[in-house]
Image (cartoon, rainbow, N blue to C red):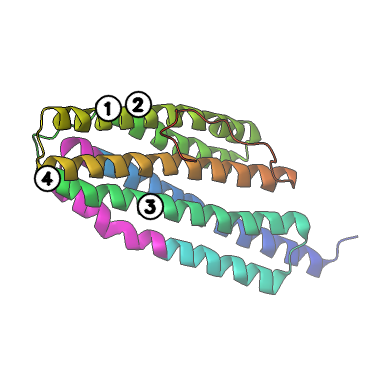
Amino acid sequence: MTTGNQAHTVTAFDNELAQLERRVLEMGGLVEAQLKAAMEALMKRDAEAAERVIARDPELDACEREIEAGALSIIARRQPLANDLRYVFGNVKIAGSLERVGDYAKNIAKRTLVLSRHANIAIPAEMSALGVSALRSIRDVMDSFTTRDAQKAEMVWQHDHEIDDLVARVMRAVISGMSQDMIAKRKDPEEIECSTHLLFITKNLERVGDHATNIAEVIEFQLSGGWRTTQRPKGGDALQSK
């Protein structure tokens, strides 16, 4: 039989966990907005928009610290048992992945500042599709977190190979352009620099997909109590280095 004090303790824990999860969701929304803004700035070569993305990055760092502090407070004061502890621990891991995705958005924005000064350097058409795919993976995995939908988390996990395929296509396009320049004996340092930035942006987006699958695995752990042991499906080709 649950006493009044026990019921109060359970309710207080549930409220604190719900508050922690709301903070994770808010962080996810900010990450999604940052990544979307970074890709729009890149495709439009909009330096001012890129600067805004960079300026907002500290908000994500603050979110992660707040979530970590909230989780530690819950553990110290409530001493949750295994089932509840999974959710607290998982929220901290999810916040860590979201912070890294925010860093990739910031990195894309920083490289956009360089690319914005070189309108003659082509951005592969596939880059836009890659950005859309990476953004969708973050949106979908946070939707699965909201609804505690293991099936949707599984779909995000399976979707990662599609991002790999797009990464390979973009990298082939960039490297092909660099090779053609070498054949034509064009050795413009600015073109080489811009192509290098495009390659790094492509790898940033690949890592966004990886973190989305990491979050999906954490959600499955929260719901089932066990970690996935199978390897995630991989796409792309020999250019991939996962």
| CB under 8 Å between discs 3 and 2 | no
Disc 2 designates what residue?
Answer: 169
Nearer to me, 128 or 23: 128
Query: In the rendered image, which residue does mark 4 sit on?
Result: 189
Q: What element carries label 1?
A: helix
Nearer the camera: disc 3 or disc 2: 2
Residue 76 in the figure: left or right of residue 175: right
Q: How far apart are the alpha carbons under marks 2 and 1?
A: 6 Å
* Crowd rating for badge 1 (residues with CA inside 10 Å; few <14, some 14–19, many 20+): some
The residue furthest bottom is: 76
Q: Please state the horizontal and vertical placement of residue 199, each as a whole percent of the image.
A: 29, 40
Q: Position of residue 191 (x, y in %)?
A: 13, 40
Of badges 1 and 3, nearer the viewer stands 1
Kindly check if marks 2 and 1 are in contact, taking CB atoms under 8 A apart as contact.
Answer: yes
Q: How far apart are marks 3 and 4 (CA)?
A: 30 Å
The earlier-in-sequence mark between 3 and 4 is 3
Which residue is denoted by mark 3 in the rendering?
Answer: 102
Is there a contact, CB below 8 Å, between mark 1 and mark 4? no
User: Residue at image x 65%, y 36%?
Assistant: 150
Measure the C-alpha gap from mark 1 to mark 4: 19 Å
Kindly check if marks 1 and 3 are in contact, taking CB atoms under 8 A apart as contact: no
What is the three-letter code of the residue carrying label 2? Arg
Foreground mark, 4 or 2, reads 4
Q: Name the residue under label 1.
A: 173
Q: Where is residue 207 in the image (x, y as percent from the top left)?
A: 43, 44
x, y percent for residue 127: 29, 31
